[in-house]
Image: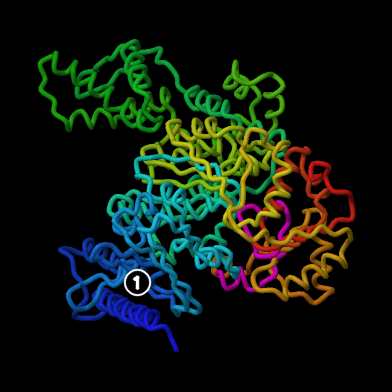
Amino acid sequence: MPDSELLDEQHHLDDARAALARMHDHTASLAFTGENTAHGGDHVSTQYLLQTLYRRMISLRDDPTVPLFFGRIDGDGTTHHVGRRHVTSEIGGEPLVVDWRAPVSLPFYRARVLDPMGVRRRRRFGFSAGQLTAYEDEDLTDAAEEFHSEILESEIERPRTGPMRDIVATIQPEQDEIVRADLATSLCVQGAPGTGKTAVGLHRAAFLLYAHRDQLRRSGVMVIGPNDSFLSYIGDVLPALGEIDARSETITSLVENHVGLRATRTDDTAIAVLKGDPRLAQVLHNAVWSRMAEADEPLVVPRGSRQWRVPAYVVNEIVAELRGRGIRHEAGRSMLPQRLADQVLRRMEAAGDAPDDRVQNAVARTPVVKKLCKQLWPPLDPAGVLWQLWSSPEALAAAADGILTSDEIRLLNGQSTTRSAKSQKWSAQDLVLLDEIADLLVRIPSLGHVIIDEAQDLSAMELRAAGRRASTGSVTLLGDLAQATTAWATRSWADALAHIGHSDALIEELRAGFRVPGAVIDYAAQLLPTIAPGLNPPYSVRRTRGELDLRPGSAPEWIAAVTAALRLEGTVGLIVPDSLLPSARKSLHDNDLDFTDVTVSATSDEDRDDPRVRFAERLELVPSSLVKGLEFDHVVLVEPSAIVADEADRITGLRRLYVCLTRAVTSLVVVHRNELPTELG
């Protein structure tokens, strides 16, 4: 006979779904239904109101495969069902579900026997296909009870299909403290594999958008990820939580969109490392301001029958005063004509005239003033400044004098062989430098909050580009120094925070692994003394150790391992060295195994952003260079030694291997023909 308590909870869920549907339909009627359409005081206000209603309508969409609530907390005379969004009843407006981000939901995540926070009982629900299947209660008044949540454990370990999902039902206290940190607080989260740092960062974005909605709707929230594949993987998390107002970018797409150019060539590693060096910021600063000139003749402005003279030394004092204020290049250039015109007006007033503001504006627009301003403070564009550095050894030597060594200057010489900036081909590193120059010319507006994932792989100049988007806002850096796999990667979080402009950020560490099983994380952790000797090793909190299988062999063995994994529930990732990608692709085709190839772009932008296309197959073929940030229920890893050898140096190769080894949630099969790296015992 069905559990009556469970039936009551299912009825409550049905009522909540019906109430959410009414809330959605009511909002839709205000936005789109003829005579009931909302109107503001004017056209602009109306459009803003309709846009707000549209976003609200989207946030109220129901996903029938996921229950509206996953937990419940009971206090003295109070009961709250905790879910992904707030749902109210039609009669009386009583809450049927409270949003997980609301203050009243806090005890669900942090209450414990020693500090119950006014809660007597915490209930968790199991579900399948959107229906409740089970519940379990934790008595927070019983100090003798040692409670272990089977539902929580099964939810953490539940096999995945498709893109990343939210973790609102399983957020742990140490994660919740990061998620709910105040908007004014910048954070850096050092997180080992499987600790949920990416999910924590996304849920922090969702929390901040909830707690500071009006402010962040104006100033904006951005998530910066390592590559498009990663952004596609995480793309469903915020919409599932009812948030559609956060932008997602990679560093490259961010600067491409800002400077209006595209990266069409690749730098050699040594050049790319140098272009990412923080000293380049001073070189670019010098290059921008080196275009300034001094007046060697007085300014003579004809006005009516008279000429008004401003001595050269006064003109130079005005320029120096503007420069000394630390303003952006274009701001100073726009102010200079008015400052010169002001000097002319002072002389007119001293002669007995009574000029007004219209006269000053007219003087500022005279050809002689405009010509002098162009000479003293010439207009610049980012591409022109950088092109001159790359095409002129003299200009580069002057800008880099005392900053770069002669060998470094020679390395950068000849980066341009074109006759103009318009025909120059730019690298991704060049675009970051162009973004730096653009900010020297015109200040880049600040967002309210920026979340940067895999931040350890960014160069100092890339971190500066990200930091410019939060110059007056706050940041959340997410990463793992042990997973630093670029030649220009940061070596410490203190350095990274200094480059991003938030040296006062709090550094938090997540070591408890919820997704990577113990057998896998312990095996991969053998690499840590070599790749990140200063880090504390992670540990798994899961009771099941997972499966780890090391097999000698080549293609037939890993094809067999993939085939066996596909018989199990969940996603399967075939991770191969980049050098073996063509042969792996051929082997999968020859064995009639359907798979998604992350290196093959979809045929259209719409397809590329559609998770139904991106995750069409359970099996995904992933080169080792693109695996970061992804996870799979079952992983087959091919030829670890080749993964190490594909990188520029052994340490970077071992870090890449560490990343690859820690993508498995349930099982890991390592297939190798060559000897395993000695660091793996």
> Is 519 in front, or is 657?
519
Q: Residues within 10 Å of mark 1 (few under 14, many from 20)?
A: many
Q: Quadrant of the C terminus?
A: top right
Amino acid at the residue labelled 1: Leu
> Is 521 in front, or is 474?
521
* Residue at point 31%, 12% (across, down): 314
Q: How is the image coloured?
A: rainbow
**Left or right side of 139 for 620:** right
Quadrant of residue 71 within the rendered picture: bottom left
Q: Does the magenta stretch include residue 631?
A: yes
Q: Is mark 1 on a helix, strand or loop?
A: loop
Coordinates of residue 609 in the picture (x, y in percent): 54, 66
Q: For the view shown, which residue lies furthest in the bottom direction?
A: 1
* Residue at point 55%, 67% (across, down): 154
Coordinates of residue 659 in the picture (x, y in percent): 68, 49
**Left or right side of 678 for 601:** left
* 97 versus 271 height, above or below: below
Quadrant of residue 52 within the rendered picture: bottom left
Q: In which quarter of the image is the N terminus?
A: bottom left
Coordinates of residue 652 in the picture (x, y in percent): 73, 40
* Residue at point 23%, 61% (across, down): 44
> Is 334 in front, or is 367?
334
- The answer to whether any part of residue 178 appears in the image is yes
Q: How many marks?
A: 1
- The answer to whether any part of residue 604 appears in the image is no
Q: Does the magenta stretch include residue 147?
A: no
* Residue at point 61%, 38% (across, down): 536
Coordinates of residue 222 in the picture (x, y in percent): 44, 51
Q: What residue is shown with label 1?
A: 60
Q: Give the range drawn in magenta.
A: 611-634
